[in-house]
Amino acid sequence: MDHPISPLAPARIIDPAPIAGVRLAARACGVRYTDRTDVMLALFDPGTTVAGVLTQSATRSAPVEWCARGLTGGQARALVVNAGNANTFTGLRGASSVDNIATAAAAVAGCAPEEVFVSSTGTIGEFLPDERITLPLMEMAATARPDGWRDAAQAIMTTDTFPKTATAETQLGGVPVRLSGIAKGSGMIAPDMATMLCYVATDAALPAPVLRALLGPAVDASFNSITVDGDTSTSDTLLLFATARADHPPVTGADDPALTPFREALGVLLRDLAHQVVRDGEGASRFVEIRVTGAESDRAARRIGLAIGNSPLVKTAIAGADANWGRIVMAVGKAGERADRDRLAIRIGGLPVCAEGLAVPGYDEAPVAEHMKGQEILVAVDVGVGQGTATVWTCDLTHRYIEINADYRS
Amino acid sequence: MDHPISPLAPARIIDPAPIAGVRLAARACGVRYTDRTDVMLALFDPGTTVAGVLTQSATRSAPVEWCARGLTGGQARALVVNAGNANTFTGLRGASSVDNIATAAAAVAGCAPEEVFVSSTGTIGEFLPDERITLPLMEMAATARPDGWRDAAQAIMTTDTFPKTATAETQLGGVPVRLSGIAKGSGMIAPDMATMLCYVATDAALPAPVLRALLGPAVDASFNSITVDGDTSTSDTLLLFATARADHPPVTGADDPALTPFREALGVLLRDLAHQVVRDGEGASRFVEIRVTGAESDRAARRIGLAIGNSPLVKTAIAGADANWGRIVMAVGKAGERADRDRLAIRIGGLPVCAEGLAVPGYDEAPVAEHMKGQEILVAVDVGVGQGTATVWTCDLTHRYIEINADYRS
C-alpha cells in the first residue's frame, strides 16, 4: 500500500544533535522489508543510566518484558530496535530471540546482557528471524556514529510516513546539556497494530531514580495525553538514557531546583515527539488540541479529554469540518468523571459555542465552521466542577483510516 | 442524506402482538421532520407497573432525569416519545418542556404527571417545540389502538433504516402471558449522536421491584453487551411496563420459580431487539458475535468482549474481511482485565487460529478468510485465567460509518 506523507507532517525533519556518549547505526537487515533499513543500534558509554515507560497491555511482547527487567537495574550500554516483526505472541521462542539479541549486543558493547535494551515493532504472531539482527551487529557497531539519530529514526518506521526527531539544548547548574530523541507511530502494517516507540538520550549525569522521577510527569503530559484510535499496542516503549558526559555539578535529587530547565526541556521535547506521532496518525487530516478545565482533578480532566479525543463521533465530525458540539457534550457525559451539565461551556477555535449548559445566545456557526476547515483545531471544554485541567491531542477519523486498516488485504 | 436499509436488517419486520392494557398511537407532529410520523403515545391501564434502565451519562437529557424520578414511583399510565429533537442541553427550558408534555399526557390519561414517561431523541442543544407534541395528544389518545406497536416503532426512528420490533409468548404459573417491544438505534441525524431507546410491555402482573430484579440481568446480557462505536448517548432509555391484565397466580417475589419461563422470554426478546440495533449500526456490513471465556469473572469477560468490540482496529479488520487476530490479541491486552498471554486461544468461525499464546501449528488462513467474508462473524476468545464468560455483539467499521458521520454536513 502506498503511504503518502501525512499532510500534517512538519515542514522540515530536523537532524537531532549528537549526544556525547551515544553512537548510532542503522542497517537494512531484511527482517521483513527488503528495500530499506530496518534495524537500529545505539551504543552508550559506560556509566549511562536509563529510565522508561512500557505498555500496560496484558499481552505485552517479549521485548517489553525484557526491558521491564532491565529497567530495574537502571544501567544501559546498548539499544537494539527492529521494524517489520513485533516478536509479540511468540511464546518461549520469542523470549529466546530477545535473549539472543541481548547476548549478541552485550558481546559487541562489552557489557552485561541486562544492560542491553531491545524493542521490536511490526507483525504480530510470527517468529523473529533474530539471526538477521545478531549477525550484522558487530559491523553495525563499527560504523556507529554520534550523528546517526535521523537514520535511526528512519530504520524504526513501519508505515509511519515521516521519521520523528527532536532535539533541545538546555543547562544544568549553568552547564549546557543536550537532549535528542526519536519516535515512531502510529503507522500500521498488516496484520499489525500501531505501536509507539520513543528513545531519548541526554548527556546529563542523572541517577536512574532521578530519571524516573523526571520521566513520569513528562510522559503524562505528552505520550499519555495523545490518542489516535484508543488502541494500545503490545509493544509501546519509551526509554530515556543519560550518559553523564556533561560536566555539571552533581544533582542532589529529583527535587533539585537546578533541574527546572532540564525538566522543562524534556517536557517540550517529549511533547514535540508525541505531537509528531499524532500528526502521522493513520489517515489524519486535522490535528486537534483538546483543553479541559474545571474538572475535579487533573487526572479527571485528562480522562474527559481522552473521552472526547477517542470518540468516533467527535472525530468523524472533525473530519467533516462539522462544528458538532452536541457530540462533545456526549463525550463529556460518557467519560465517567464528574461534570456539571448546567455549567458546561465549550469553545471551538476560541469562539464560545455553548455556556451554562446551553448554546450561547445568538450563536453564529459561520466563524466556527471556518475554523473547523483548518488543519489545526482547538476545542476547549470547561466542565464546571473544580480546578483540574489537562490538554489532550488527537487527530480526526477519516476515510483514509478505514482504507489503511480495512482495505489493505481485501 | 439517503439511508438505504441496512444489509443486516431482518428479512421481515414483525408486527408485535397486542398486550392487554396497552394502546398505542403515532402521529406526524412536525417536531423536526415534515413528512413522517415523529411522536408516539402509549396508554397503560390503571395498575401498570414499570421498571427501567437509563443512560449513565453525566450530561443526560431532561427527559431522562424526568424518567429517573418517575421510576422511583414504579407506576405508569402513559409514555410519550418524540424523534427529531433530543431536548438535551436545553437547561431549565428543557425541563419545563418535559413538564408540559407530562402534564398534558396526564390530563389525557387521567393520571398524575409522575405516571407519565417521556423520551426525546434527535438534535442536541435546540429547544423542543413541545406544543407540537402536547396539542395533538388528545386526538392521539382517541385513536390509540392495541395493534399500534409497529407504527410506534416507526415514529421513534431517527436515521434508523428499519423499525425494530419483537414479540413473545410465554407462561406464568400455567397462564399464557405476552411480551411486545420496540427499539430504536443506532441511527444518527446531524448534528446528533446515536441514541438507544427501548420500550417493552407485558400483560403479566409483576410489582415494580420484581420487574427491576428481572430487568437488570436481562439488560446486562442484551443492551449492555452491544456496541456500535463505544459512544454513549445522553438519552438512552429502556422501560419495561407490566399491565397486570393476565390472570396468573400472584408472583411471590423475584426468586419465584414460576418466573423462570418469563425471565427467559424477556431475555430472548431484549437480546433480539439489541441485535436489531447492532444490525442497524451505522454503516454496518457484518454482524459480529464475540464470545469470551476463561476470564476472572463474567464482568471481566464482558469488559474484554467490549474492548474487542470497540476496537477500531478490530472493527476495520472485520470490515476488510481480514482475519487479523493480532488485533484481537491487542484488544484483549488493553481491556484492563487479567489475561494469560501464554494461554490465550482464539477461534474465528469456530476454527482455531491461535492457542497457548501462539499461532496454531500449520495454521491455514484460507477457511478463516472465507468465514470473514460472510455477514455473520463469530470470534471466540479464551483468556486462560478463570471461569468468567460473556457474549458481546458489535458490527464492523466501514467507509459508510465515516460517510454518515463525517460527510453529512461537509
Image: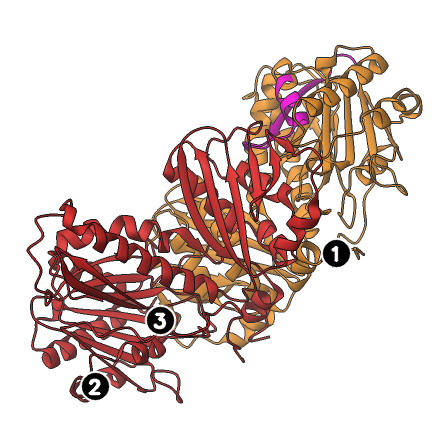
Chain colours: A red, B orange
Q: Can you say whether B375 is above or below A384 in the image?
A: below
Which is more foreground, mark 3 or mark 1? 3
Give the side of residue A326 with respect to residue A219, left or right. Answer: right
Of the numbered discs in the image, which one, if any, rests on residue A121? 3
- Report, in whole angstroms, how far the alpha carbon at label 2 lies from the one at label 1: 56 Å
> Disc count in the image?
3
Of the numbered discs in the image, which one, if any, rests on residue B6? 1
Residue B81 pos. (x, y %): 77, 30
Residue under label 2: A140
Circles 3 and 1 on the same chain: no
SS for tag 1? loop
Residue B286 pos. (x, y %): 64, 60
Q: Which residues are magenta?
A: B45-69
Residue A384 pos. (x, y %): 49, 30
Q: Can you say whether A55 is above or below B39 in the image?
A: below
- In what quadrant of the picture does the C terminus of chain B appear? bottom right
Instruction: State yes or no: residue B56 in magenta.
Output: yes
Give the side of residue B39 with respect to residue B390, left or right. Answer: right
Crowdedness near tag 1: few (<14), some (14–19) or many (≥20) residues, C-alpha within 10 Å: some
SS for tag 2? helix
- Report, in whole angstroms, how far the alpha carbon at label 2 lies from the one at label 3: 20 Å
Of the numbered discs in the image, which one, if any, rests on residue B59? none
- In what quadrant of the picture does the N terminus of chain B appear? bottom right
Residue B408 pos. (x, y %): 73, 55
Instruction: Pinpoint the chain carrying mark 3.
Output: A
Which is more foreground, mark 2 or mark 3? 2
Amino acid type, mark 1: Ser
Amino acid type, mark 2: Met
Work out whether mark 2 precedes mark 3 in sequence or the reverse, and give the earlier one.
3
Front residue of B274 and A50: A50
Residue at x 31%, y 53% (from the top left corner): A219
